[in-house]
Image (cartoon, rainbow, N blue to C red):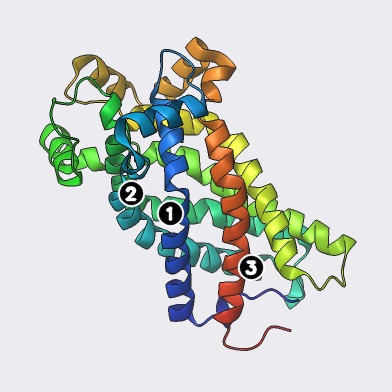
Amino acid sequence: MSEVGWQQLDVSRFLVGTGGLTLLMDTVLHPLDVIKVRQQFNTRAHVSMTAVVRRVWAKEGWRGFFRGFVPSTLGSFPGTVVYYASYEIVKDACTRAAAVRGGEPSPGVKVASSLVAGCAADVVSSVAHTPAEVISQRLMVDPLRSFFRRGPPMSMRGAVREVVHVEGLRGLFRGFWASVYTYAPSSAVWFGSYEGSLILLRSIWPDSQYANLEELTCGAVAGAAGAIVTNPLDVAKTRLQTLDAANEAHNKIIRKGYWHVFWNVCKTEGVRGMCRGLPPRLFVAVPGSAVTFAVYEIAKRLSCQEAPS
C-alpha cells in the first residue's frame, strides 16, 4: 500500500480527523498522565505507580485522575492539529527536496525527513501546548503542594489567575524551551523510529495485507523508543513547570533555568530520578502510540482525495 502524502490530502477532513483522535486519546489516557506527573513531582523518595493510584483514589476519588483534563484538552486539540499539519508539510517538503531526479525517495531519506519533520512540528505546536500544560500540571499536583492556599481544590481559573498574578503572561509559557528540549527530540525519535520500523517490516513482508497490524506494531515500537530516550528530559520539564514563582527558593531555581534542573536531577537522584514516571509514561506511550499511528494512517487514507494504490 502506497503512502498518502500531504499533496493528496483533503486538509479539512484530515484536520478534523486528527482533532477528534486527540480528544479520544486525551480522555482515555489522562489518568496515566496524572500518575506520571505526581511521580515526577516527588523529589524526596521514590513513590511507586500503585502507591500513587491508591493515594489518589483514597483522597480524591475518580475525579482525582482527571485533574487538569480541561486545560490539557483545550491546549492539545489546536496544538495537535497544528502538530500533524506541520509534520506532513515539512516531511513533504524535505522528501521532495531530497528526492533524486524526481524518483522515489530512498528509505534513508524517508527516515531523515520524518526526523526533521517531527522535530519541526513539535517546535511549532509547543506555542499552543505549553500554556495548557503549565495550568494542567499545576492542577494535577495541587493536592501535593504545601504552598497552595488551604481550602477547596484549585480551579482552572484560579490556576491561571495565580500564574498571571505572580509571573505575568510570561508565566504561562514557563517551560516553553524545556518542552522544546523534551518533546522535539522525542517527536523526532517517535516519527523516525516509526518510519524506520515500518520500512523494515515492509521489506521483510512486502506483500503483507495487514497494513493496520503493521502500523500498530511500529507505532508501539515508536512509543517505547520516544518515552525511554527522553524521560530524563521530561522529569526536568515537569519539575520546572510545577515550581511556585512566589516561593523565593523556587524562584531562584526558575531563574537558573531548565538545564540547571536537569543536571541537578541527574546529580542528586541518579538513574532512579531520571526514570521517575517512566512506567506510567510507557503505559501511556506504547498503546497510545500504537493506536495513534494506526488511526492516524486510517484518517489519512479516509482524507485522501484520490484512492491510494
Mark 1 Cα-neighbour bin, 10 Å: few <14, some 14–19, many ≥20: some
Of labels 2 and 3, earlier in sequence is 2
Q: Secondary structure at mark 1?
A: helix
Question: Which residue was labeled with disc 3?
Answer: 97
Q: Are marks 3 and 1 in contact (CB under 8 Å)?
A: no
The C terminus sits in image quarter: bottom right
Q: Amino acid at mark 2?
A: Phe
Instruction: Work out whether 247 lies above or below 122.
Output: above
Instruction: Work out whether 145 lies above or below 306.
Output: above
Q: Which mark is residue 26?
A: 1
Q: Residue at x 47, y 72 (%)?
A: 17
Instruction: Work out whether 252 lies above or below 97.
Output: above
- Tell me where residue 252 appears, x and y as whole percent: 26, 17
Q: Residue at x 58, y 83 (%)?
A: 304
Q: Secondary structure at mark 2?
A: helix
Instruction: Work out whether 68 lies above or below 178.
Output: below
Question: Which residue was labeled with disc 2?
Answer: 69
Marks 3 and 1 sit apart, C-alpha to C-alpha, by 35 Å
Q: Amino acid at mark 1?
A: Asp
Q: Amino acid at mark 3?
A: Ala
Q: Are marks 2 and 1 in contact (CB under 8 Å)?
A: yes
Q: Is residue 296 left or right of residue 207?
A: left
Between residues 21 and 248, which one lies in front from this camera angle? 21
Q: Are marks 2 and 3 in contact (CB under 8 Å)?
A: no
Marks 2 and 1 sit apart, C-alpha to C-alpha, by 8 Å
